[in-house]
Image (cartoon, grey):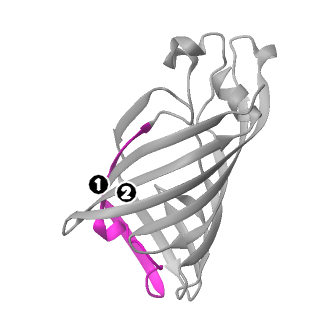
């Protein structure tokens, strides 16, 4: 099967300004942020169906010098290391993956269901004003589920995503965030989700 290259553009969201900030991580110590949020994005990578949904934003982290463990609705759970002077960072962790049902589209007829699985991620990039530049690598251990169990199949799937993120304060406590990027998937991801 040919490798899939998917262009993903148009992830939009509104977040509480208290919960999202561009540039370096905050001062040392604990931080907690919560606020309303929403998104408009493809249902899963490569999908021709877009979804809009309300997503509450919750973020809890502890920052100490150049290291920041975090738990977040938007970013999963992981560890971030960064350089305050340069804006360079790297992070890794675990997050929820992308689920889909064969009933989502007539094009998926004959394929298996994929439940909401976990993904492991690694991100690196630079946080600057007004743009953040991020390269993300995601690993999924996918199992497709068919009505006939003997057809079930397991995949080691990867997605690589260079992204540009920017934000614009709409009000004192509200930020409009725009994210654009390119998603490059391996043939295992393409086969599991699209065939």
Residue 55 in the image: above or below residue 107: below
Q: Residue at x 64, y 27 (%)?
A: 193
Q: Residues within 10 Å of mark 1 (few under 14, many from 20)?
A: some
Picture quarter with the N terminus? top right
The residue sitting at the right extreme is: 150
- The residue lying toward the viewer, choosing from 85 and 39, is 85
Residue 71 in the image: above or below residue 146: below
Q: Residues within 10 Å of mark 2 (few under 14, many from 20)?
A: some
- Is 20 in the magenta? yes
- The residue lying toward the viewer, choosing from 5 and 22, is 5
Q: Earlier in the sequence, mark 1 or mark 2?
A: 1
Identify the residue position indicated by label 2 in the image: 57
Q: Position of residue 191 (x, y in %)?
A: 72, 26
Q: Residue at x 70, y 25 (%)?
A: 144
Find out whether the residues at labels 1 and 2 contact each other: C-beta distance under 8 Å: yes
What are the residue bounds of the magenta stretch? 15-41
Identify the residue position indicated by label 1 in the image: 36
Q: Position of residue 8 (x, y in %)?
A: 51, 41
Element on which disc 2 rests: strand
- The residue lying toward the viewer, choosing from 29 and 41, is 41
Quadrant housing residue 46? top right
- The residue lying toward the viewer, choosing from 105 and 154, is 105
Element on which disc 1 rests: loop
């Amino acid at each position: 099967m040919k490798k899939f290259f998917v262009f993903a553009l148009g992830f939009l969201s509104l977040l509480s300004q208290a919960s999202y900030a561009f540039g370096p991580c905050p001062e040392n110590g604990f931080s907690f942020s919560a606020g309303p949020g929403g998104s408009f994005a493809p249902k899963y990578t490569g999908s021709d169906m877009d979804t809009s949904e309300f997503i509450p934003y919750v973020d809890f982290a502890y920052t100490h010098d150049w290291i920041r463990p975090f738990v977040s609705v938007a970013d999963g759970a992981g560890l971030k290391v960064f350089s305050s002077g340069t804006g360079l960072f790297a992070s890794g962790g675990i997050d929820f993956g992308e689920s889909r049902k064969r009933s989502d589209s007539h094009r998926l007829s004959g394929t298996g269901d994929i439940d909401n699985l976990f993904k492991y991620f690694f991100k690196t990039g630079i946080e600057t004003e007004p743009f953040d530049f991020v390269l993300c690598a995601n690993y999924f251990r996918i199992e497709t589920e068919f009505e006939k169990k003997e057809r079930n199949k397991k995949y080691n799937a990867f997605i690589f995503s260079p992204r540009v993120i920017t934000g614009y304060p709409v009000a004192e406590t509200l930020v409009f965030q725009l994210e654009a990027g390119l998603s490059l998937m391996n043939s295992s991801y393409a086969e599991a989700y699209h065939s």
